[in-house]
Amino acid sequence: MGHGPDHSQTGFDHPTLKATMNAYNSDGFGNSGLLSRPPLAAKQGDSSRPMAVIIGSGFGGLAAAIRLSVKGYQVKVLEKLDAPGGRAYVHKQDGFTFDAGPTIITAPFLLEELWTLCGRRFADDVTLVPMAPFYRIRFDDGTWFDYSGDETHMLAEVARFCPADVQGYQNFVQEAERCKTLGFEGLGSIAFDTLGDLIKAIPSFMKMGAWRSIYTLVAKHFSNDKLRTVMSFHPLLIGGNPFSVTAAYALINSLERTWGVHSAMGGTGSIVQGMVGLLKERGVQLRCNAPVHQIRIENGRACGVELDTGEFIAADIVVSNADTAWTYKHLVAAQHRRHWTDSKIDRGRYSMGLFVWYFGTSRQYQDVPHHMMVLGPRYKGLLTDIFKRHKLADDFSLYLHRPTATDPSLAPEGCDTFYALSPVPHLDSGTDWASYAETYRAAIAERLEASVLPGLRDSIVSSKVSTPQDFHDRLWAYKGAGFGLEPLLLQSAWFRPHNRSEDVPGLFMVGAGTHPGAGVPGVLMSAKALETVVPHVTA
């Protein structure tokens, strides 16, 4: 993989910005062209409303389908897998229910909005349970920090590790709050469709100190190494290296403190099913086992999609909830891509890969909370191996998910459901996961048994693994990266693939790979941003 943008250069002389401006202008996406395209007219009769075809049924695709159907579009959702959800797919095995990916719900109002748009109440379909603590961060020496939204508790936890850092924590909270106000509330649902959108946002980026890394920001306020880890790990939840990702992502700390961290009864899949239910009520067609072969472009404009079977589905607009790099490289023919060329896609800096081991036990581990980080001996060194060297290290850190701590129905009686997620390099590491997966899984089992799950290996009754190769083959994730482009400053906002394609009129993006980025709040916000740039439907 080539090197990413040179972060030593800033401002309007930056080569990345210049190249993007030139492509933007040459493609006719300035203040004229698509921005002045007339609305799509809805003719008489429901079946003649303009058609939006959505590729993929992850959270972003489902949210986009809901919003576009409310705007007056006919909507068809096409899903490659045998069930909806995308990265939020649900595996059921041996009586255990395993959420494949997202397990943490923050900013639940973004989900409530979707139900409100449909004249429904979210709480009637899904029950969210607040987490206390949000997470337990366990260090390699056996000490741990219980991270929560309770200020008194957090001050006590900080003081337990380093009394001198209490004031630093309070100062950090204020900076995180500023980032939430400016970044999430102020910029999250802006599509960054034009250069003007970027220019207007520059003062907010400056106020957030967005040129700094999140770790640099944290280190300014904390002297204790363990507290620096606790307060900086959040970008890993959206695919970013804390030592590289913009400090603007301190907003995650404030999001959690403001709206809490929740889990859904029945697992995250219950939210997916609730969204699918809304679409069914609205008459939106959802087709599974329908992989898209290509986005068809005629007269310079997306006009529909062709499935692997050869079937063509016509559309007035096409929305891709698939990985953006995969969409451009594999679904859009090269002659239609003046901006997102193969070389530009290859030069991007991508998030880490994920190795996920789903397992069920014949016993329960009552002292293990719902969310736990089981950290290894290294922090910066491990992340350097993963993100910069693309080297699979012998040591690892894990996110351990035990949903049966909240909802025992996700496992047979007396049993526990788990997954252990290990950040690993994406496929540029060259790892042969087909042959190495079991070795890596066994190492994780050994580590967990020695630390937080005694007697684990003798109690395993169900097991399944997912590797970066699976993300590539099954989820069409470019390089097997779990979150698309890493959320670096020059791969965020206007620099990220736009919600309205820079290359193909009539093509739009939603989900982790476009603005504002990965994570459940991010992909739900991307559907709001999308809504601002699709053509209006007129009666």
Image (cartoon, grey):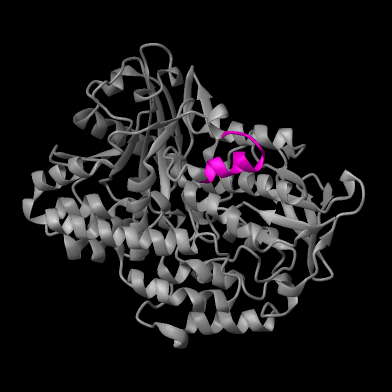
Residue 108's x, y, as percent?
47, 42
Q: Is residue 22 left or right of residue 297?
A: left
Q: Is residue 101 left or right of residue 508?
A: left
Q: Is residue 376 above or below residue 246?
A: above
Label tally: 0
Residue found at the very far top of the displayed protein? 413
**Residue that appears at 47% across and 68% down:** 491
Residue 241's x, y, as percent?
34, 59
Q: Is residue 222 above or below residue 54?
A: below
Quarter-of-image position of residue 295: bottom right
Q: Is residue 3 left or right of residue 157?
A: right
Q: Which image quarter holds the C terminus?
A: bottom right
Residue found at the very far right of the displayed protein? 44
**Residue that appears at 37% across and 64% down:** 248
Magenta stretch, main secondary structure, is: helix
Residue 375's x, y, as percent?
23, 43
Q: Which residues are magenta?
A: 110-121
Between 30 and 78, which is closer to the camera in this rendering?
A: 30
| In magenta segment, residue 119 | yes
Residue found at the very far bottom of the displayed protein? 13
**Residue that appears at 72% across and 71% down:** 336
Quarter-of-image position of residue 59: top right
Between 123 and 446, which is closer to the camera in this rendering?
A: 123
Residue 410's x, y, as percent?
45, 21
Between 472 and 295, which is closer to the camera in this rendering?
A: 295
**Residue 241 visible in rendering:** no
Between 276 and 358, which is closer to the camera in this rendering?
A: 276
Q: Is residue 359 left or right of residue 327?
A: left
Q: Is residue 93 above or below residue 483?
A: above
| In magenta segment, residue 444 | no
**Residue 401 visible in rendering:** yes
